[in-house]
Amino acid sequence: MVQGRNAHDDSPGTPEGHVYDWYQRGVKLLKEGSPAAAAALLERAAMAEPESRSIREALARAQFNSRQYAEAAESFRLIVDANPAEDYAHFGLGLALWRTGDVEGAQEPLAIAVAMRPDERHYVSALKSVRATLRARREM
């Protein structure tokens, strides 16, 4: 979970409060429909607490929702690399790769997510769509 360490420094643009405060504000901004603002704040939190899975996942979601797909893919990949059992991170990585145009690359993380959670219809639907796109491209 997010640590409560004080991350105050005198750098211009450093948000007030502790890293946990940044995380909480970032998640709130994301829920309120301001993903770009959330991503900016959560990026600062991730720099201060690079090992925090909670911060990294919230950052990846904010990046994805603000159409920063390459950045979201990298954030989700960091989670997957640290903990390959994170089904949601595999799903997010697959979706982000798909949105960057890497349909081929999206297939594996989506297949892993489905293998972990075959009951999750969003995972199954995304994998089916990616595979259908790949089949259609081969048939052209």
Image (spheres, rainbow, N blue to C red):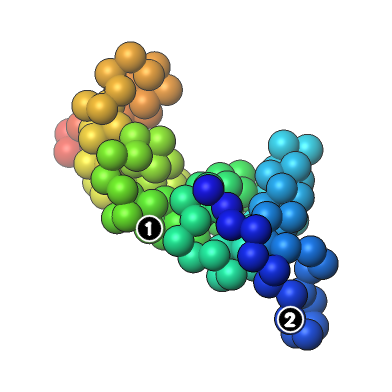
- The type of residue carrying mark 2 is Asp
43 or 70: nearer the viewer: 43
Give the structural element (helix, strand or loop) at label 1. Answer: helix
* Residue for point 49% across, 60% down: 71
Element assignment for label 2: loop
86 left or right, relative to 96: left
Mark 2 packing: few (<14 Cα in 10 Å), some, or many (20+)? few
In the rendered structure, find residue 9 and report the number of the disc placed on it.
2
- Please say whether residue 107 is visible from this viewpoint: no
Instruction: Point out residue 33 in the picture as x, y percentages from the top left corner.
Output: 75, 40
The picture quadrant where one finds residue 43 is bottom right
Quadrant in the picture for residue 132: top left
Is residue 116 among what the camera can see? yes
Q: Is residue 97 above or below residue 119?
A: below
Q: Is residue 35 above or below residue 18?
A: above
What residue is shown at x 78% (from left), y 85% (from top)? 10
Q: Can you give x and y, in whole percent of width and height, for residue 68 in the image?
A: 56, 56
- CA distance for labels 2 and 1: 26 Å
Looking at this view, is 37 or 23 the one in front? 23
> Which quarter shows the C terminus?
top left
Q: State which mark lies toward you, 2 or 1.
A: 2
Label of residue 78 in the image: 1
> x and y percent of residue 129 in the render?
34, 27
**Residue positioned 70% across, 68% down in the render:** 6
- Residue 134 lies left or right of residue 49; in this view the side is left
Q: Which mark is residue 109?
A: none
Q: Nearer the viewer, residue 52 or 26?
A: 52
Q: Is residue 39 above or below residue 133?
A: below
Question: Residue 82 location in percent, x, y?
Answer: 32, 55
